[in-house]
Amino acid sequence: MHRLETLHLNRNTLQGRIPSFANCSKLKELDVSVNNLVGQFPGDLPPHLHMLQVSFNNLTGIIPASLGNITTLVFISCAHNRIKGNIPSEFAGLPGLQYLYAGANQLTSRFPQAILNVSTLIGLGLTLNGLSGELPPNLCTSLANLRILTLGGNLFLGHIPSSFTNASNLSVIDLSTNNFTRLVPTTMSKLTKLSMLNLENNQLQAHSGEDWEFLDSLGNCTERQILSMSVNCLSGHVPSSIANLSNKLQQTLYLGENQLSGNFPSGIANLHNLVAVSVGGNHFTGIVPEWIGTLKNLQQVDLAANFFTGVIPSSLSNLSQLGQLYVASNQFIGHIPKSFGNFPRLQYLDTASNNLHGRVPMEIFRIPSIIAIDLSFNNLDGQLPTNIGNAKQLVHLVLSSNKLSGDIPNTLGDCGSLEYIELDSNIFSGSIPTSLGSIRGLKVLNISANNLTGSIPTSLGNLQVLEKLDLSFNHLNGEVPTKGIFKNATAVQIDGNQGLCGGVPELHILACFVMPPDSIRNKKSLVLKVVIPIASMVSIVIVIFCFFLRGGKHKRKSISLPSFSTKFPMVSFNDLARATQGFSVSNLIGRGRYSSVYQGKLVEDENEVAVKVFNLETRGAQKSFISECNALRNVRHRSLVPIITVCSSIDSSGNDFKALVYELMPRGDLHKLLYSTPDYEGSSDLNLITIGQRISIVVDVADALEYLHHNNQEALVHCDLKPSNILLNDNMTAHVGDFGLARFKVGSTTSSHGNSSSIAVMGTIGYTAPEYAEGGQVSTAADVYSFGVVLLEIFIRRRPTDDMFKDGLSIVKFTEASFPDRVSVIFDPQLLKELDETPIAFKEKHVHCLLSVLNVGLCCTKTPPGERINMQEVAAKLHGIKDAYLRSSAVASVAVPE
């Protein structure tokens, strides 16, 4: 092989190590990229090699210094391996090297100084490594011939060198996902051949008009196609000079995840050749102008997570090239435009977390290319269109938390590409379509918290790739299948369906009763032998009962147990006594005004439960029990503590006994978690309550209240929201409990089945709305106030009854006095510690999310009830904040090497 000059073995499935090519003295080109090769980076190479391409393998070790001796090298690419170390200093002796690509490895240390001596470099790519420090100020003075410079995904910091202007031929600059600060150099105007400028995921700033001068200078870059400034510290209004970019900006404009404010930037109207525009994750307000529909080349529009109001512009349907439309987490009202069905190429439609109402337009299911639809967390009603089966390419369907009703269309099973179906928290009725079992690629099916009836289709057990099935909180009955996913109790949720039986033992539900054949044959004779005598006896009992009832009509009235629409399993006093070891003090996990709560395990199914026993000798306890029963028989939601059964019996002494049995929440209540100390049994390290978990907790509670207030025929007011009534499961998912003071609200009045809505004291001091102190009536606005106090407490970690809150100072005023500029002095120290450990490139984003959360809390705690936002608005805002936080955290986890 000594005559071999070119060897291209790329894009195969080669394995093993790269052999020695030292004997191939005439070899000039060696390309073994995109294979499965392992071992050390090859060092024994021919002396006259021009091109070395070993990228996209699994090579390890370091880049050998011996490469610096091959002075004929022009092109080196070793990207996408596991190479460590840095670029050898010997590379300074490569006089003809033009392209060096070593991205997506594990290189560390500072920018390789040896590179600065290779003045012939045209392309330099070091993305996705662990390089750190500041860029050399003479970077582009030394490398004046550069056309491509990609350094994204490292740990560089400091400012962007002004020497970039010396490389006048630069066409591609990627400095994304680093820690660059300060302003963008205005000298960028000299880079007239620049086609891509990617500065996203840094800490670059622009506040006043002068800070935005770089935007003016970019108007001279005649070939620019991509400008990305997303995830930085840009704030204020986008200057009108953005219009000066004019038609020179031919492809994309990304300004998302900053702190930009004001109206939708009017200058964008001049950018007629835009293919993609992203302003999501900012503070923009006002309406989205109809002229956006004149940008005919748009393929992607991202307006999500802002404060846009008004209706979604129907002119968007004029964008025949549009493939992605994101308008989630705003304050849009009105209907989803039917004209959206005219999109011929739309693949992604996301309108979640707004205030949209009306029906789901059947037109959107006619879009032949649609892949994902998310309309969740709105007020959509009516039936799901039956033509949904036309969406053959649909993969994601998310319609959670609306008011959709009627049957789930059987045609949904015709969507053969579906992988995710989320229809939870609606009011769907009827049975589960058996056709869902024919969607072979289905991974997630969530139809919980609806009014579904009938049995579970056995066809669901045929779904081989199904990972999660949530059927909880419906009215399902019959036997639970045992095949497929039903074998995995951790992947199936069926709580809140009291008519179900059977299934695998790990589900811990009652076995199905099967009547013996002999019993069926003797059934008719049994009726004759038993029913007639019983009927006679019942007649006698009725006569006696009426006699005593008439004689005792002036005696004390007893309060009966309300009937439940769902039949709960029967338990007796003895059952609960055995479950709690005789209501032992060692099983006591909580005590309230009217009741005590014991941890226990039911003997029949070994479920861990929380038994709430009412102290009926306490005045008001009987009423509290009835109120809680009345509330629980009407509500079902994933963020409410699931009830297992109810017990109204007599105890061992013959006294009345009333108890509620709930699913046990292993992490206890939020109050104990917030304020537990190291010597408290069962206490948790406060560091475990992360920023993300705190945000998730307030979102869970907001969802629960939004459901209680807005998704029932009668609004249910909790009346006693506080941390001790918020319980946490193993996954730190929050559940609202304790409905002992709850009241149903109809119109402007409230009732509790005959009880007056006028109240003197309601709830717990520190959490009650100010109007209650003045004898105000029960209202959902008062719940909103309590929620706001709880939210502030979660992030400040101070009780509203703390000694510091006196002489007119409350937790609300304490927060208002420091918001937004001095909130660091009031945040929970543990939260500040987590922020300090956050990579600096993302700390600002997390602080922004926290400020947004506190702002929601302050909007909830306005003194006049009419000025408070409702829970629908609260839930929508918090979901938007959570989404923004998760996006920022996801980027941080990818960008920062372990």
Image (cartoon, rainbow, N blue to C red):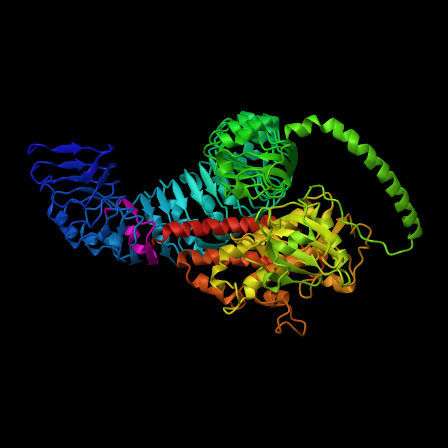
Q: Position of residue 259 (x, y in %)?
A: 50, 54
* Residue toward you, 37 or 155: 37
In the figure, is residue 677 to the left or right of 768?
Answer: left
Q: What residue sits 43% from the left and 38% below the top?
A: 247
In the figure, is residue 26 to the left or right of 547?
Answer: left
Identify the image quadrant of residue 8. top left
In the figure, is residue 620 to the left or right of 860?
Answer: right
Identify the image quadrant of residue 375. top right
Residue 328 in the image: above or below residue 294: below
* Magenta segment: 145-166
Please say whether residue 466 is visible from this viewpoint: yes
Q: Position of residue 468 (x, y in %)?
A: 50, 39
Q: Position of residue 596 (x, y in %)?
A: 66, 61
Q: Is residue 146 magenta?
A: yes
Q: How many marks?
A: 0
Q: Is residue 491 magenta?
A: no
Q: What residue sits 57% from the left and 67% below the top?
A: 818
Q: What residue sits 51% from the left and 55% below the top?
A: 693
* Residue toward you, 382 or 511: 511
Q: Position of residue 145 (x, y in %)?
A: 23, 46
In the figure, is residue 1 to the left or right of 529?
Answer: left
Residue 344 in the image: above or below residue 595: above
* Residue toward you, 261 or 570: 570
Q: Quadrant of the N terminus?
A: top left
